[in-house]
Amino acid sequence: MALVRCLNTLGCPEFSLAEACALAAKHGLAGVEVRALGGTVDLGGYLAATYGSPEALADRLATEETGGRVVAFNTSMKLVGWGAAEREQLIDVVPWAEALGVRWLRVFDGGRTADGAELAQAAETLRWWREERAAHGWRADVMIETHDALTTAAAIRRLLAVVPDAAILWDAHHTWKKGGEDPLVTWRAIRGHVVHVHVKDSVSVPSARHSFTYVLPGAGEFPMAPLTAELRAAEFSGPVSLEWERLWHPYLPPLDEALTVAAQRRWW
């Protein structure tokens, strides 16, 4: 089974949405995961200033026929330690997701330990969201990225024990590098809840922000081949997105180059 491959606009943060969709189409990708546009991560503000209304955006994309579709909007909201501004940014992006038929909105896990207090706060934040969603009849829902506290299968399963129907965006590189876990071990423990996967590659050489350095796909140490084989065998149908973090790490080459190399090396 072929993977549903996508790009993340962290790799082309200066692009418009149409340009990002065109880049995805150029590389034969199924869609676009939107984190940054026009140089900002304030997606609601950017989309309003650029397109005016969600309906106008939907019409524009249909007219331009760029070929790529939006599979997710990634917000800065955290389940643990969120602020009012983050909550407003999440709500601001919902009408745009509804207009484009986007199923998922990314939120971060937040926290550090995934202990009882943090899990209780995460559950309370999800309760707030679900009340808002039900009250407005929204189709879009949140998926929780394994980013801060949820970097091992054990931590993720502690959250799932509190919120059994939570949808997970599994950052396979985070649980591998930050959590020290074999991706196959993590996947087999949480696969029933995973709706979206982030992949990237790195080497164990310190960079400005991390104890590792991101590299072009296939040039690093991430065990991508066994992971893709496992995802295909499981017939995973959710997006598998190259999270090329060029917005945060300007040393990275352009996303177009990364996608070209990934294809040449049959990385994914």
Image: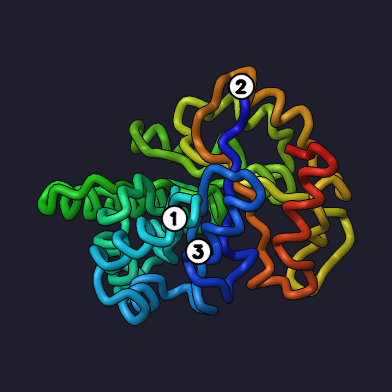
Q: Nearer the viewer, mark 3 or mark 1?
A: 1
Under tag 2, what secondary structure? loop
Q: Residue at x 80, y 37 (%)?
A: 266
Amino acid type, mark 3: Arg
Please report whichever mark, 3 or 1, sits nearer to the chain's N-terminal start. 3
Q: CA distance from mark 3 to mark 1?
A: 21 Å
Amino acid type, mark 2: Met
Please report whichever mark, 1 or 2, sits nearer to the chain's N-terminal start. 2
| Up-down relation of residue 10 to residue 31 (above or below) | below
Query: Is the N terminus in the top left, top right, bottom left or bottom right quadrant?
Result: top right
Label 2 crowd (10 A; few <14 / some 14-19 / many >=20): few
Q: Residue at x 50, y 63 (%)?
A: 35
Q: Nearer the viewer, residue 72 or 205?
A: 72
Which residue is under mark 2? 1
Q: Nearer the viewer, mark 1 or mark 2?
A: 1
Question: Can I make out residue 95 in this image?
Answer: yes
Q: Residue at x 31, y 59 (%)?
A: 58
Task: Decide if residue 221 is on the left or right side of residue 3.
Answer: right
Q: Quadrant of residue 87?
A: bottom left
Amino acid type, mark 1: Glu
The picture places residue 176, in percent across and down from the top left corner, at: 71, 43
Which residue is under mark 1? 65
The picture places residue 11, in percent across and down from the top left corner, at: 64, 64
Which residue is under mark 3? 35
